[in-house]
Image (cartoon, coloured by chain):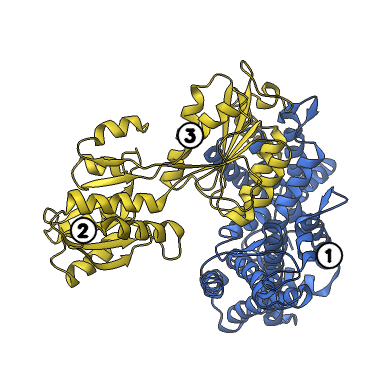
Amino acid sequence: MRYARRAATILALTALVATSACSVEDDPGTSSDASATCGTGKDFLIGMSQANNAEPYRQVMNDDVTNAAKSVPGFKVVVSDAAQDNSKQVADVENFLSQGINLLIISPNEAKPLTAVVKKAYDQGIPVIVLDRKVEGDAYTAFIGGDNVAIGRAAGEYYAKTLLPQGGKVVEISGLPGSTPAAERAQGFREGIASNPKIEIVASQTAEWLREKGQSVMDAMLKANPDIDAVYSHNDPMAEGAYLAAKAAGKETAIKFTGIDALPVPSGGIKAVEQGRLQATFQYPTGGREAIDMAKKILVDCTKDVPKTTTLGTMQITKENAAEAYTTLGGKQ
Amino acid sequence: MNSPNPTAVAEAPPETPPRRRPIRLPRDRHAIVDSFFRFQSLFGLVAVFVIAIAVSPVRNGENVFLSSGNLANIVRAVSEIGIIAVGMTFVILIGGIDLSVGAVLGLAAVGSATLMVDSGLGILPTVLIVLFIGTAFGATQGAIVARIGIQSFIVTLAGLQAARGIARMWSGGLGIPIAYGDGPQEAPEAFSMLSGSINGVLPVPALLFLAIGVGALLVLRTTAFARHVYAIGGNEKAARLSGVPVRRVRIAVFAISGLLAALAGIIHAGQLNQGSPNDGAGYELDAIAAVVIGGTSLAGGSGSMGGTIAGALLLGILNNILALNNIDANVQLVVKGLVIVAAAALQKLRPRIA
């Protein structure tokens, strides 16, 4: 009897937790209608399928989408996290379709595995906005993303004209080898510094996007090149790691550091610029706000021809505009 | 097989009286309680199914959870984990664990893509080679466990790293896309049927999971091999003394787990049109969760295949209904954790009735 009662208690508790968790949010199925057409004064359910919430950049993208949607009456956004698993992301989109979303925003984990399910949604007449990473083919409504070559070029021009106008020795800390952003940020930077031949890249090492590797790589490069003038890092965390290594060697004031990404979060690059560790960082836009703008055009304003590809610009962040940029980009104090 | 430790009974000094009085229940209650625990995961599955229907959103008068498209999505989504969990059940029944299955799945997915796209092999040779690789990998781990006597946790943890490394080397670290057609660098069209459905209703991966699940269920109910598996898990020493070929059964069990992980990897590649070396990360934990929810004891010797199949389906339904109700992804993780603990707690409470 004792066992049966205890067992019943556990079962009851589990059922309670499961059902109470399920009733946390109101029922979206009744508030939206699959056959909803565009127009003002209607309710729309938007599915946001994220590849991996664990990356700060993608968490900021989710925040941008949900915050922007709050200012559009009738928009309700549901976010799913595929946790870097292609299969999970396919299932996430399928679940959105079951729920009858009116528009899909997706930042795919990888192109090939997500192409089919994106096409399935698109073929059902659901507008699809693809963010940051592409899918194959053209079965989607619009793609919005940043331009890593342009960002690298902007950084290079900043080096050539502002940071090192007299020239100097630069080391590059690059992202994961074989990844497109790393290759493009490297290429753009070389184009940008071409106007100033006195700038020399004396070493280039990968730290695989990671702060801790940025630190150990910088340790080694400081040994090999004691007279470095500046560090061009492919993202902010690696630049922060390099700064720590230079600080340990007592060289943090002699060397200038720049990063890329400029996330408006406390651990992000904008704060590092504001607090003087980095000289500059260059924003890699999430496209979250732009996606909701476009969703509003499609669903509320009934615009038929939105641009198939939108390439977002970058923002240069230095000490002068860091505090302001942090607020404009939606960062919380 | 439910008696936890027969050797302890044998070695106990005869003068020690039994400390705990056996639980006495009226006959009918006894039977009800016993069958409740025996079919715990089945009851759990029914309960979760009913709750899912109750809390499902309704759209245009139709219960979204019960729509045939949604049910097909659920069985499709659980099929890979389910197939892995079937193999994992054998391993756990002998008191072992196989942490390498997710990495073997990734390796098999890479193998399927590379052999068809880069080497231009047909479907049959590709499938046979990949299944052989998975089986050989599992058998090797089993042999190390059985012959050298290292714990399977450690051997398969090492195997996880090795399989992941081999997959990355084989693929050059990047996913290998699978395009279909007759030309060079293209895979046979028929391979894409793994992402299709029978009559547009039953997804092919789910059919494979069903077939393998039923097959394994029959193996576990009827064969001498299964009795050996339970015997080793219950008491290895006693099993050896009564003539069970312990080492061979050990190796076979890990080979089965590797084989099924490789099969899941082939399905994975077919569903996603890609073989990526990083895929399948963490799948081993989902498979273990399915087995535990299914009522199989991690100590070995007791459990059932039906329970594992029910456990995998239960997890799939739980994932689906949480997603359909837009529960926050982080809350979903907590709920799943609670369900796993609850299932294990129920198992602990199971009365030891002879």
Q: Is residue B97 visible?
A: no
- Picture quarter containing residue A283? top left
**Residue drawn at the location 80% of the way across and 28% of the way down:** B62
> Which numbered marker is on residue A196?
2
Are there few (<14), some (14-19), or many (20+) residues within 10 Å of tag 1? few
Residue type (three-letter) at the residue carrying disc 1: Gly
- Chain letter, disc 1 residue: B
Residue type (three-letter) at the residue carrying disc 3: Glu
Are there few (<14), some (14-19), or many (20+) residues within 10 Å of tag 3? some
Give a yes or no on whether discs 2 and 1 share a subunit. no
Between the residue at mark 1 and the residue at mark 3, the CA separation in whole angstroms equals 52 Å
Q: Which residue is under mark 3?
A: A290
- Circle 3 — which element? helix
Q: Is residue B28 above or below residue A298?
A: below
Colour chain B is painted in: blue
Residue type (three-letter) at the residue carrying disc 2: Asn
- Circle 1 — which element? helix
Q: Is residue A63 left or right of residue A263?
A: right
Q: Which residue is under mark 1?
A: B215
Colour chain A is painted in: yellow
- Chain letter, disc 2 residue: A
Residue A84: x %, y % from top left: 54, 52
Query: As drawn, which residue projects farthest toward the top?
Result: A41
